[in-house]
Image (cartoon, rainbow, N blue to C red):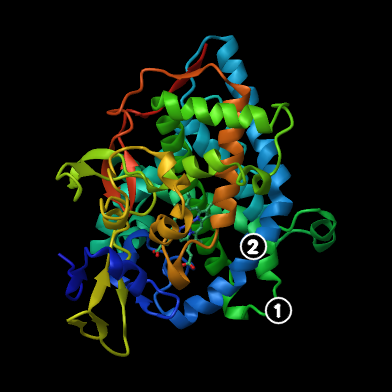
Amino acid sequence: MRIGPNEVHILDPSFYNTLYSNRNRFDKYDYFYSMLGNPEATFATISADLHKSRRGGLAPFFSAQSIARFGTRVQAYNNRLVERMRDCAARDEPIPLFFAYRCLTVDIISEYLFGRNLALLDREDWGRDFYSAWRSLWELSPLIRQLPFIMTVFNAMPRWLLALTQPKALEVIDMQLLCDKLTAEVLASDPDEMAKSGQPTMLWEVAHDPNVPQSEKTLRRLRIESNSVLAAGFETTGGTLAHMTYLILAHPEARQKLEKELKQAIPDPDNIPGFQTLEKLPYLWAVVKESLRYVMKSRWTRDIANRRTSISVGAYSRLSRVNPSGPIRYKEWVIPSGCAVGMSALYIEMDPEIFPDPRDFKPERWLEPGAKERLEPYLATFGKGTRMCVAQNLAYAELYSTIATILLRFPTLELWETDASSVEAVADYFAGMWRYEDGKAGLQVKIR
Ligand code: HEM
């Protein structure tokens, strides 16, 4: 058993904003973040100093301006999703939105990253194989944390043996090979062609950024980065879209209010404005915030609010940090240098003192006088401080425009063979994971 140094897990909500404050530049905890075997990716970089320079290379691509320019592409993928959903409706088939949303987010982030999409939205099976490979990586992540060399061992094994003994590892290796191939293709692109394309390709730009040191631009480093950004960009947003759609469809009163607002503001459903306009619609804004806060029930982890169990999408694990250069002080506590300390956002978002009746899905709480200023500092779904999600703008662009598109284009959308148990999270592999058995997973809908 591989055991890290002592780790402190804090439950006090006021500690979250202290620990993850912009003022602190703590390291990440190497044991905890070794789970995906990608220490050269910005996400898993341990040292705060190295992280600062890596993040500097990525951040401009996710600025509000960059994402605003990309907005029409996000809408183009939404339109493709709508076409596929209409085909299903014509055949009176249910639509597995759990997978469909992941196809959408993979196609979006792959275009952004590699300059070409993986066309999952065109796949008849809604990209189930692709999801299965990523799910396998998450499921292997506790083992990788214990035995960080295990993927090297799997990589050295013959494929037939791996297929027989470790089929999940084989799926993971094939997915990594795909990222290697895509990364190598981008780096070998014709500079004139790249200059002509209207939209910058993130990997190409990072590889040609004079401010990024040469050692950071190797094929190996860039393929690890691309793999990590692909993972971070699809599962989180795809999962949040599924979570949000379920909450809206399962709460008819909220849905009615939301649809009324959307129809008044957007009379032509074929002409949906950009996300900067959509986020100004108060009820839609409140639904997005409440969906990011709301934690689904689950049987595995305890819910502090009512001693029931819960986890959800987003990163609900402790985001463990270490101060290598001195102790961390909090109230009467002194956490020694080198000791890992972390806190899960769950303990803020389900705190009844901050969010009364936390088990109720109540977008209205965000519309009370002064609520924005009072509650937003406690919405920690994207993390906080220097390591918080670098791509929030892209995530919000997708959440607003996809939900508006789906509700406006399909007013008769309804849940199909889906209830609270279908969307229950059954595991916490850093992000909460919904039940997934025999290639089936929750959230199906039908268009009447
Ligand atoms: C609703 C959607 C999303 C949620 C809830 C979310 C959540 C988070 C959280 C909590 C972290 C901090 C993790 C930590 O401290 O260990 C993070 C980091 C990160 N996220 Fe997101 N994320 C979302 C969407 C995205 C998207 C669309 C991308 C696309 C590229 C992305 C890329 C990243 C990256 C690269 C990091 C590492 C940032 C760093 O260490 O500087 N995320 N995300």
Single out the residue that lies furthest toward the front: 369
- As drawn, 188 above or below 369: below
- As drawn, 35 above or below 429: below
Q: Position of residue 279 (x, y in %)?
A: 60, 46
Separation of marks 1 and 2 at Cα, in angstroms: 19 Å
Can residue 74 be spotted in the picture?
yes
Q: Position of residue 301 (x, y in %)?
A: 19, 47
Nearer to the camera, 184 or 333: 333
Q: Indicate the amino acid at tag 1.
A: Pro
Single out the residue that lies furthest toward the bottom: 325
- Specify few, some or many for label 1: CA neighbours under 10 Å numbering under 14, 14-19, or 20 or more: few
Q: Which residue is mark 2?
A: 63
Nearer to the camera, 313 or 347: 347
Q: Indicate the amino acid at tag 2.
A: Ser
Residue drawn at x 46%, y 65% is 388
- Secondary structure under the numbered disc 2 in the rendered image: loop
Comparing labels 1 and 2, the label whose residue is closer to the camera: 2
Q: Is 176 displayed left or right of 143 in the figure?
A: right
Q: Which residue is mark 1?
A: 210
Q: Badges 1 and 2: C-beta atoms under 8 Å apart?
A: no
